[in-house]
Structure formats: structure tokens, C-alpha cells
Amino acid sequence: MQGNGGQGTRAGRRLVVVVACLCGLVLSVVGASGVLALAGVVSSPSSTVAGVAPAPAAVPTTPGPATPTAPAPTVTVTLPPTPAPSAPPTVAAPTPRPPTQTPRPAPTAARPGATLHPVVGITDGDTIKVRVGGTTERVRVIGLDAPELRGAECWSQKASSRMQSLVQSRSVQLVGDPTQDDRDRYGRLLRHVVTADGKLVAQALIEGGFAKEYTYDRAYAHRDAYRAAQDRARSKRLGVWSAACAAPAPVAPVAPVAPAPTAAPAAPVRPSGSCVIKGNISSSGERIYHVPGGGSYDVTVITASKGERWFCSEQAAEAAGWRKARN
């Protein structure tokens, strides 16, 4: 019977070793929660571990002191600390990029506080008169060429009327251009003219076909805009681009002047008989008669078609209004 008790003790120890191995295996497979559940099973002697029933306790059959059974060793399982959940990585929000903007052209409106000058007259479609500092200045608008009024060019009157409707009796801003001179050869100021509401006068005239774009020597500000406006006016055949201005003005035929007929020189009239006195008319219209032997007698030629004549006596010549030559 004692031998049976020793075998039971060894079986219990083997069971403990098996349980410890199972705990390690469970720890690696099911984690800490599984191990805790298994530990509860191990701590209860009446529980069944992995389907293995505990060995029955030995019952002594004879009186005498029983061999004390060694208590089963307590297995302490140290669980690794459960790691705290790591915070998700912080992803920095992308820095917003400013939207790409297309550069805009400089505004053409009169700048706040800009000096405005009153317009006091219109010369034609590209020249105006402006009051500047108490003086009336002629201003040639940069970038356009309007038909001339003096030459009665096609659309010149309409161009002047359009300029008048834009600026007459109003105030405008005068803007210089560093690419151009301050004045032209006629002493006129060279300026961009901008209305109080921001309208470029030159562009408005070109857009309506009242003038053409004009570049003098060097490119100036707004030239691309003016040329684009000219292309639009030309495609629409407006104003100076219309058929009325494209066809040359009819010219009245000039009848050739026939040359004046040349009078055939009259044959000198020969005196008859004693009528040898020459009645001549000078270039000044004076009537003079020449007698034979006089200083001019031989060189004087009588032309009857001019009213000259022969006289038979000096008395007859004087009676007809001729005077005697002094040589």
C-alpha cells in the first residue's frame, strides 16, 4: 500500500509539470486571458485538466500511521505586462498651397486720387485739348491714328464725333508712357487718355473702327490690347475697315485742255506806191509810226493781224492816232 502511495505522488508531480507546460503553450497561443482561465482550473483539485481525472487518494487498509502525502507544488505563472496600446502615429495635415492665380493686367481705371483734367475741345479723332494747370494743352493720344478732318478722309467726321462723345466737357486722366517722348514734333503732349470710369479712349475708338492702331518707333503700354481690338473691328468690317472706306473715292475725269491754236505769222505787207510809212504798235500798246531813214525803220515789221498798218503820209498816220518814232 505504501508503494501505491508513492506512485500517486509521482503521478501528481507529473501532472503539475504537464500543466506548467500547457500553461506556457497556452500563453504563447491564446494570450494572457487564456492563461488566467487555465490557472483557475489548476487551483481547483477537483477540476479536470485537459480531460485527465485526478488520481484517487490511497486508503489505508491496516491500522497504523499513514504516510503523509506531499502537497502538490504551487505553480506560479508570471504573466508579462500587457503592453499599453500604442497611440496611432500622428500624420501631419498637408500644408494647403495657395491656388495658382493667373497674373491680371494692370487696371486701366483712373487711380484713386489721380489728377483729372477737364477736356475743353476736340481737334479730331486722335487729338484733344485739355486744361492742365491753368494752360490749355493739345494732347495727342498714344497708340492710334484717326482719319484726318482736313483731308476729308473716310470716316474722319465720325471719328471726331466718337471722340467728342467720350471726353467732351468731361475730365480725364493723362498717363505718360516711358517708351514715348513727352511731346511730339508739333509740341503736343503724348499721353494715354483714360476716362473717369476707367475706359481707355484709344481702345474704344479702335474697337469701333473709328481709328487704326499706330506704333511710333517703339512698343507702348496696351499695344497688344489695341491690336486685338483692331483685329476684331477689321473682322467685322467696321468704320475705316468697311467697304465704304476700302474703295478709293471716284475721281472726276479731267478733260484735256487743247492747246491754243498758234496763229500763223502774217506775211509782211508790202507797201503799194508811195505808202511806205510803217504804223507799228509797241508791246505796251503805244502806236508809233516809222518813216524811211529812221533808226528803227528797217527792223520794224508790220503785222496786220495785230492792227499794224502802212500809211501814205505822216499826216494820215497822226490823224489815225499814231505818233512819230523818236529815233
Image (cartoon, rainbow, N blue to C red):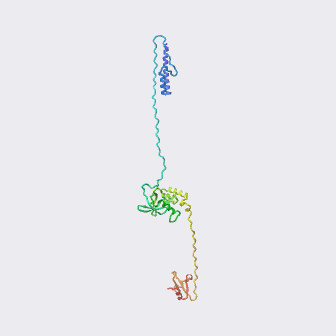
| x then y, percent, for residue 206 | 51, 58
* Residue 201 or residue 222, whichever sits in front: 201
| x then y, percent, for residue 279 | 54, 85
| x then y, percent, for residue 251 | 56, 67
Q: Is residue 26 above or below residue 164?
A: above
Q: Is residue 14 above or below residue 201?
A: above
Q: How many marks?
A: 0
Residue positioned most to the top: 63
Q: Is residue 199 above or below residue 62?
A: below
| x then y, percent, for residue 240 | 53, 61
* Residue 76 or residue 123, whichever sits in front: 123
